[in-house]
């Protein structure tokens, strides 16, 4: 189906179309679907016919991955629990101080 002037989708490669940067993450040859993931993380499916239409129209081009891809993925994978700067001695002290406030024999 591809013409000599069209770009074939390759899993793991980055492309730009209509101002959007995306990576091909899967190709379903049985259903003729190209699954892409935008740099923002959103997933989308593109019909292979649409892929080649974009290519013939000149609105599809290969691209380099975003420079901050590694930084962005590390931040998304790391949960933000806040900064805990307490040492074990400080934590033990807080626990011991809390026991003084308990009235065990009411």
Image (cartoon, grey):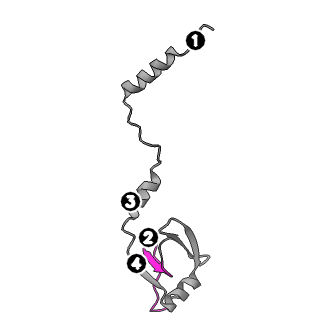
Q: Magenta span has 16?
A: yes
Tell which circle, 3 or 2, labels the residue nearer the N-terminal end: 2
Distance of label 2 from label 4 (alpha carbons): 11 Å
- Is 8 in the magenta? yes
Q: Give the secondary structure at mark 1.
A: loop
Do labels 3 and 4 touch, CB within 8 Å?
A: no
In this picture, residue 102 sits left or right of residue 21: right
In the displayed structure, would residue 81 be above or below residue 90?
below
- Closer to the observer: label 1 or label 3? 1
Between 43 and 32, the one lying in front of the other is 43
Q: Earlier in the sequence, mark 4 or mark 1?
A: 4
Residue shown at the point (54%, 83%) measured from the top left: 51
What residue sits right under mark 1 in the picture?
A: 103
Q: Earlier in the sequence, mark 3 or mark 4?
A: 4
Q: Which mark is residue 12?
A: 2
Residue 67 screen position, x and y as percent: 36, 68
> 74 or 50: nearer the eye?
74
Disc 1 or 3, which lies upstream in sequence?
3
Residue 48 drawn at (x, y percent): 57, 81
Q: Is residue 103 above or below residue 45?
A: above
Task: Give the x, y percent position of residue 76.
Answer: 46, 55
Quarter that holds the C terminus: top right
């Amino acid at each position: 189906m591809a013409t000599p002037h069209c770009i074939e989708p390759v899993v793991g490669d980055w492309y730009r179309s209509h101002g959007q940067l995306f990576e091909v993450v899967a190709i379903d040859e049985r259903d003729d679907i190209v699954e892409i993931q935008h740099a923002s993380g959103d997933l989308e499916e593109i019909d292979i016919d649409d892929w080649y239409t974009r290519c013939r129209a000149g609105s599809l081009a290969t691209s380099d991955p975003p420079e901050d891809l590694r930084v962005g993925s590390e931040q998304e994978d790391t949960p933000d629990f806040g900064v805990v700067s307490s040492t074990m001695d400080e934590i033990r002290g807080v626990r011991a101080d809390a026991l003084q406030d308990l009235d065990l024999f009411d």
